[in-house]
Image (cartoon, rainbow, N blue to C red):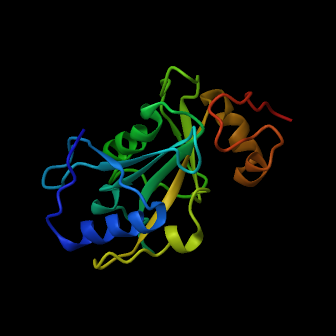
């Protein structure tokens, strides 16, 4: 388990924002940085959020990198699933740490993880959308005292076999498909029309 160092005010403000939302202390996990001069990404893990039997992970450190698409704020990731497996929360930090600076993490974007995240599921890919666990006021335009705002985006697990179907359907139709459950890591695969 990593230690989240309060070396500057932005980190403190971000954590206070999360404490106000979840009203509990998270566990912290730190990824070793792959970018010289930047600290690694920290994942805050909340068990039994949004309810008992679920796990939520939220990152800090993705937004410390730059990307040309980030004009109206910088993202951090949030994943919430119906599982007690720690790997589901920690994968957000791993993805953020490994793709920051190269990936915009824009709504609708997919990520082929190419391996199972946890033994409780065969899901091995993700898509990005608004975080279902947080209200808009809690995930958009978060001011932590820097020259940019943070926008927390949702990371949703899916099967890599669904990537083509997702692309054909589009985000909206995939999200509203009767077989889709954004918290389930064991749902049936969605097949084409």
User: The N terminus is located in which quarter?
Assistant: top left
Residue in the picture at 39% in, 39% down: 90
The residue nearer to you, when weighing 62 against 108, is: 62
Left or right: 44 with respect to 116?
left
Q: Position of residue 122 (x, y in %)?
A: 58, 22
Residue in the picture at 34% in, 62% down: 63
Left or right: 6 with respect to 86?
left
Image: 173 above or below 134: above
The residue nearer to you, when weighing 174 against 132, is: 132
Left or right: 147 with respect to 187?
left
Residue in the picture at 47% in, 65% down: 21
Q: Image quadrant of residue 53?
A: top right
Image: 14 above or below 4: below
The residue nearer to you, when weighing 163 against 157, is: 157
Q: Position of residue 28 (x, y in %)?
A: 29, 47
Image: 141 above or below 59: below
Residue in the picture at 34% in, 68% down: 16
Q: Position of residue 171 (x, y in %)?
A: 70, 51
Q: Position of residue 137 (x, y in %)?
A: 54, 74
């Amino acid at each position: 388990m990593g230690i989240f160092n309060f070396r500057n005010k932005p980190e403190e403000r971000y954590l206070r924002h999360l404490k106000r939302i979840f009203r509990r202390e998270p566990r912290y996990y730190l990824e070793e940085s792959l970018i010289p001069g930047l600290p690694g990404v920290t994942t805050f893990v909340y068990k039994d959020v949004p309810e008992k039997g679920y796990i939520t992970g939220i990152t800090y450190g993705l937004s410390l990198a730059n990307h040309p698409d980030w004009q109206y704020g910088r993202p951090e990731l949030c994943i919430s699933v119906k599982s007690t497996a720690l790997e589901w929360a920690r994968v957000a930090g791993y993805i953020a740490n490994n793709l920051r600076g190269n990936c915009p993490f824009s709504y609708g974007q997919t990520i082929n993880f190419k391996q199972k995240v946890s033994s409780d599921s065969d899901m091995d890919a993700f898509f990005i959308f608004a975080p279902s666990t947080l209200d808009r006021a809690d995930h958009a335009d978060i001011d932590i005292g820097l020259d940019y705002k943070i926008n927390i985006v949702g990371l949703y697990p899916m099967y890599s076999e669904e990537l083509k179907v997702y692309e054909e359907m589009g985000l909206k139709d995939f999200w509203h498909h009767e077989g889709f459950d954004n918290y389930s890591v064991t749902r049936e695969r969605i097949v084409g029309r």
